[in-house]
Every structure is written in C-alpha cells, then in structure tokens.
Amino acid sequence: MAHPLVPQIIEIATPVAAELGFEVVGAVFHTNQRPPVLRVDIRNPQADTGLDDCEKMSRALEVSLDVAEIIPDAYILEISSPGISRQLTTDREFTSFKGFPVIISTSPAYEGQQDWVGQLIRRDDIKIYLNQKGRVVEIPRDQITKVQLDERR
C-alpha cells in the first residue's frame, strides 16, 4: 500500500520535473528504513534519463519539498529512472506499448488465473484487452493489480 504522502509528493514533484523537461513516473516512500527513503522515478522524454537528469531533479525537488514542509523528519531523497522494465500505469504508456507483450496480474484470480500473458491491445475505463494467440481476453480493471512489460519475449 502506498504511503499517504505519496500523492502530495507527486503533486509537488510534477511541476518541478516539467520545468526541467522531465516527467514523474512514480514515487515510493519507504518509512520502514532509518532514515526513511523517498524515491521518485523520473523520465526524460527527449533522451535516455541519465545521472545528470537525476541530480538536477534531486536538487530542485529537495528545495520544493523543504518549502512545502510535508515530511516532518529527516529522510533520504533518491531520484532514479525506472528503465524499460516497469509497470504500465498512465494512458500514455498504454498507448505507447500497444502491441507489446505484457503480464497482467489480477487479485482475486480472474477466470481461475492470476497472471495473464499476451499482447496489449488497449484499455478503457472498465477493462484491459489482451491478445492471446489471436484470442481477445477482456480483464476487468478493478481486478488488475499490475500490468508490466514482459521482457521474456
């Protein structure tokens, strides 16, 4: 389960990233570590996301988070790039990776299966459509826990 501060952190990080030409892909706040670790994943849509990009974002976001004062105690800020082996979450990603092999995980199991493998067709407000060897499978979004690129193919 995501930390309750994550939506606020993303809200603060998104315009900071946009000003630098980046996109925020996600954030995780690991409060079970001492000190806690806040990791924000960014992507440079113009080129591969590099160490310089992460450093620029780190400096800029650190200032914005300090001004916002939403994290009361000391923490470590990590900025990274999620790379290609990531989950698909945004409409843009679902459009960009149409036709790519994906693994869809469900909970509870849908039609007796928890993991579905096939080519991504599309998603709408209710379902994600998957091509399994020419057969279209429609999986309800409210049962889907994760959609990720299948790098085994």
Image (cartoon, rainbow, N blue to C red):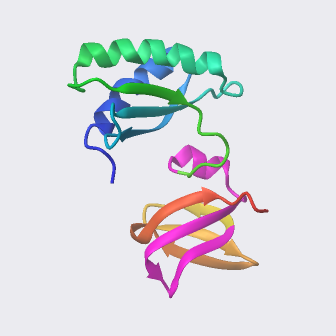
Q: Can residue 77 be seen in this view?
A: yes
Q: In this view, does 153 lie to the left or right of 95?
A: right
- Residue at 73% of width from left, 57% of height from top? 151
- Residue at 60% of width from left, 61% of height from top? 122
Question: Of all residues shown, which one is farthest toward the bottom?
Answer: 112
Depth check: give the residue in front, 37 or 92.
Answer: 37
Magenta-highlighted residues? 89-118
Q: In this view, does 73 lie to the left or right of 127?
A: left
Question: Of all residues shown, which one is farthest toward the front?
Answer: 34
Q: In the image, is residue 121 above or below residue 59?
A: below
Residue 90 is covered by the magenta coloring:
yes
The quadrant of the picture occupied by the N terminus is bottom left
Residue 66, percent from left and from top: 29, 15
Residue 41, percent from left and from top: 51, 34
Residue 78 is covered by the magenta coloring:
no
Q: In the image, is residue 95 above or below residue 9?
A: below
- Residue at 46% of width from left, 80% of height from top? 109
- Residue at 32% of width from left, 44% of height from top? 32
Q: In the image, is residue 85 above or below residue 100?
A: above
The quadrant of the picture occupied by the C terminus is bottom right
Question: Of all residues shown, which one is farthest toward the right?
Answer: 153
Q: In this view, does 128 lie to the left or right of 96?
A: left
Q: Is residue 86 left or right of residue 99?
A: left
